[in-house]
Amino acid sequence: MVGSLHRYVPISTALLVASLMALFLLVPGRAQQSGKKPQPAHESKSYERPTDPSLYVGEETCKTCHEDMPSKDFVKNYEGSPHFVTTMDKRKGPEWHGCEACHGPGKAHVDGGGDKTKIFTFKGSSAQEISARCLGCHEYGAEHSNYARSVHLQNGVGCTDCHDPHHAKESQFLLKASQPALCYSCHLDKKQQFNRPFHHRVNEGLVKCTDCHNQHGGFLTRQLRATATEDTVCLKCHTDKAGPFVFEHETVKIEGCVSCHTPHGSSNPRLLKRAQVNLLCLECHAFSADQGGPPATPTFHNQAQKYQACTMCHQSIHGSNSNQFFFTP
Amino acid sequence: MRPTNHESKTAMKRRMARISWVAFSVLLFAGAPRARAQQDVEQKGIEQGNYNVKQSIEFGGRFTSISGDTQAYDSFVNLQQGPRLLGFTTEMNSLNHHGTLFDRFSFSNFGYGGDPNQVSRLRIAKNTWYNFDALFRKDENFWDYSVQANPLNPTTPFVNGPAGFGGTACTACVLSTSPHTMNTRRKMGDYNLTLQPNSPVRFRMGYSRNIIEGPAFTTIHQGTEQFLLEDVKTTVNTYRLGIDIKVLPRTNISYDQIWNYYKGDTGTTDFAQPFPVSPTQNVDLGVSFNAGASQPCGGTFLASGFVNPACSAYFSYLDHARTRTKTPTEQLNIQSNFWPDLDLSARVNYSSGDASVAGYDQTLFGRESRTNLRNQFTTGPVFGRRVAASADFGATWHITNKLSFQNSFHYTNWHNPMEFDASTCSFFSPNLLTNANSFTPGSPVPLTCAPPANVAPGTVVHNASSAPDLAIVINSNFLKQDEKSNLSQLDYRFSEKFGARVGFRYRHRFVADNFFDAENEVFYPGPTPALAARGACALLAPAPTITQANLPTGCTLNGDGSITLVAGSGFAPASAIVPPINEYSGLFGLWAKPLQNWTIRYDMELMSADGSFTRVSPTHSQEYRVRSKYNVASWLNLNGNVLVWESRNNEFQQGDLQR
């Protein structure tokens, strides 16, 4: 089976890439036909707000047309959201206030009789352009400072793919939908993992995807978060496994919990990778290595009976302060 | 051939079923927009004073009828019968954005009334002044999935066994509960306050509390598998202080100080002693009953009905410790877009914590038949440190409007030097009904052991497997990892509809796993003088009498017939130091939007490493992911994912580190 994968995966990958390349040779033409306005190219890097006050018209002018346009309660929803606070900072210039803080100066748009091409609209803009607008205010602290290198942005996922300032379904972070439904809308494979019999309680609402992953990017793979002490994020909740221990089960600290557990969900108890505990342990502690030294399973372990669950005796398997065989805590 | 009456009825049923399904599907899709529209009708709320107030409350009840394995149900689902608060929300928004104490207030809850997951969230904010966010979560963890822990307990009856253990089959040998049952609760609270959230200088403070508590069962492997009651109690308190400063245009500096305090107060005791070993004494025989394999011992029950006193069994057991870990952490974070073409971020983090265990106490009254152990006391301090430092740097260089170069560097180094100075006193006797005797030393001893009340001076009944009578063992372990990884990527946006990237990740790890232990042990003689020479001081060659010349290095024959062992092993052998591990990964990805509402994303990563820490860690892996998301309408998404992951490790052995 693995051999088959080896043969077919690179071939299918090449075919997929070639197909997509061929498909998208045609796409720019279709995009032009869709009537979407071209965005100023320089805005894709970072958005520098024009500071000339004469370019701005103010929020009240916007409201005259956009009270319910392009959708119902367009302005009202914004006024009830945390973004309204931008209007309250009088120390900053008009480029930081209200609608024009995000959509840019509106005078040309107004003078043009509502010409859409004279103002920035988020719909149809690229993820990079959208993110550049948002990050002008939001890129601070460890939470947001790596969005420019995040897997999301690299895959064309911008801020407004998850957030909707005008019609949010979640009030604090202005999300389009609550977690985990929002995350599942792309990460469908994770949905089936959390539907397995043993799973972290994400579907139940106890845990959120963002408890473990920083959706805005980070320095760890899978955009994982870490504890303040640079331990794996699992230990934020499973505090009793953190140690440090005199006798560490080294794999826990070196390779992480995922050496033995599947973090999202599993068909096996305790989210283990294998259905039977001994089969998991023996993958490392194999009889075949018995001649090599202490790590191997002693030959007096009777795999036919009570020792099948290694943790029956080695119950402090994550680490112990008192017993090198993990018999006691 | 005409169908029979039964066949035609079956076919009709099938047709009706098909029609029903089609009709149901049509109704489902036809009704969906309307249902969605109904959901979208926004609650207007009422205006009271300066606030618009919205409230909703959803009561319900669960009616459950459970048959079969209720323990498995509780382990998997644990939704019981009764009234529930399924949801409660209150939202208040100030009408003029100048509320007296707050402008936005949100309070939501669910799960109360007995569900295993209960969550409350409170958010209060006053524009430009503060944001307060509180989250409280409580989850119940019930685990009694007995199949995993003890799947193959045989039912061979015990001769002379009491009810449930004798007769035609040992029905009580098959445990009705998992020996590692638990019924614990985790309560997590996170509270964060931000002052002046929109100011160039803003302050943050936070507090988190995580408590895990409740009863559990566990076992200890000494003599047999003794069944223990565990009183689980761990607490973590975390305090946070932080400040964000905007020093230059598009440049932010954040500094955080975090204090983390862990308290572990879990203790275990022997759960029950149901088997009489004499008219006045009962013992615990553990959980492993297999008469055919002489477990817990041959002839477990005597004709009198009492437990065979030669068996391994416990009168009592106690294990308790107060574990404390204090870890202060400092973190500095800098982000800058000062140069429009360059996006920079860096983070430095340093933690240096102390860990200690005070009052460690392990007390055993019973018998380990293999060694003749009758009583054992182990105490001693545990102390050590957890030091972790990390430094990260990320940069994005926008070379052109479409082309950018991204680099992320991650460095972390942590080490855990920990030590346990164990003092163990052991007393021996030939059976459960005979109290241990104590030896009166005539030579200096490294440890003074107060014998139990019923221990009298006399001849100690050791056997060849008996542990030292006195032992001071220093276990000093040191685990360290130094890790550097760098990810470089070139990202090109062909159009607004199509982009691709190619990258390379390098990861280097160095792991050190060293230990040092030193033993100072005393072996008393008895019942024969030669039995002082046992364990690490066993005679080099069989001889009728003990002589110094016939003892291993480190063993000294004392004048009172005892033998003292002073030994130590240095740092780990070279095999315990893993050769540095280098991983090389090639990455490729592309995304495309053929239509406004259709996105396709593709990622792949091919990794090759020159080593691994464990046998299950891959040295080669390939991962391919394809995701498609088509938003047909506001109420309908058509999504698809394909994930292919394959990994290999052809290493036979990894330096004996599969411990």
Image (cartoon, coloured by chain):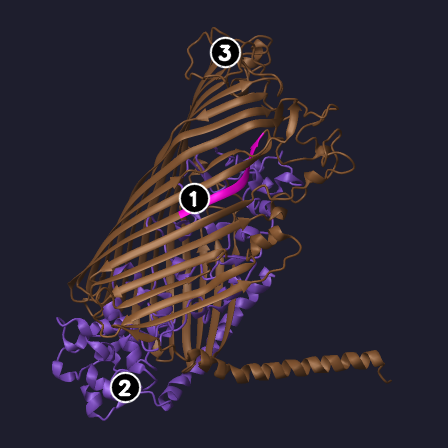
Chain colours: A purple, B brown
Kind of residue indicated by mark 1: Asp
Residue at 44% over, 72% down = B601
Q: Earlier in the sequence, mark 1 or mark 2?
A: 2
Where disc 2 sits, the SS reads: helix
Residue identifier under label 1: A240
Where disc 1 sits, the SS reads: helix
Does any portion of residue B385 appear in the rendered image?
yes
Image quadrant in which you'd find residue B567? top left
CB of mark 3 within 8 Å of CB of mark 1? Answer: no
Q: Residues within 10 Å of mark 2 (few under 14, many from 20)?
A: some
- Nearer the observer: mark 1 or 2; the answer is 2
Residue identifier under label 2: A66
Can you give x and y, in whole percent of width and height, for residue B465 in the image?
58, 21
Q: Is residue A323 left or right of residue B178?
A: left
The chain that hosts pointer 2 is A
In the image, B338 versus B199, the foreground residue is B199
In the image, A22 versus B133, the foreground residue is B133
Q: Is residue B164 left or right of residue A261?
A: right
Question: Is A80 situated above or below B616?
Answer: below
Where disc 3 sits, the SS reads: loop
Kind of residue indicated by mark 3: Ser
Kind of residue indicated by mark 2: His
Q: Residues within 10 Å of mark 3 (few under 14, many from 20)?
A: many
Is B252 included in the stretch rendered in magenta?
no
Query: What distance separates the C-alpha of mark 3 from that of mark 1?
Result: 42 Å
Question: Is B356 situated above or below A84?
Answer: above
Residue identifier under label 3: B562
Residue at 25% over, 68% down = B103
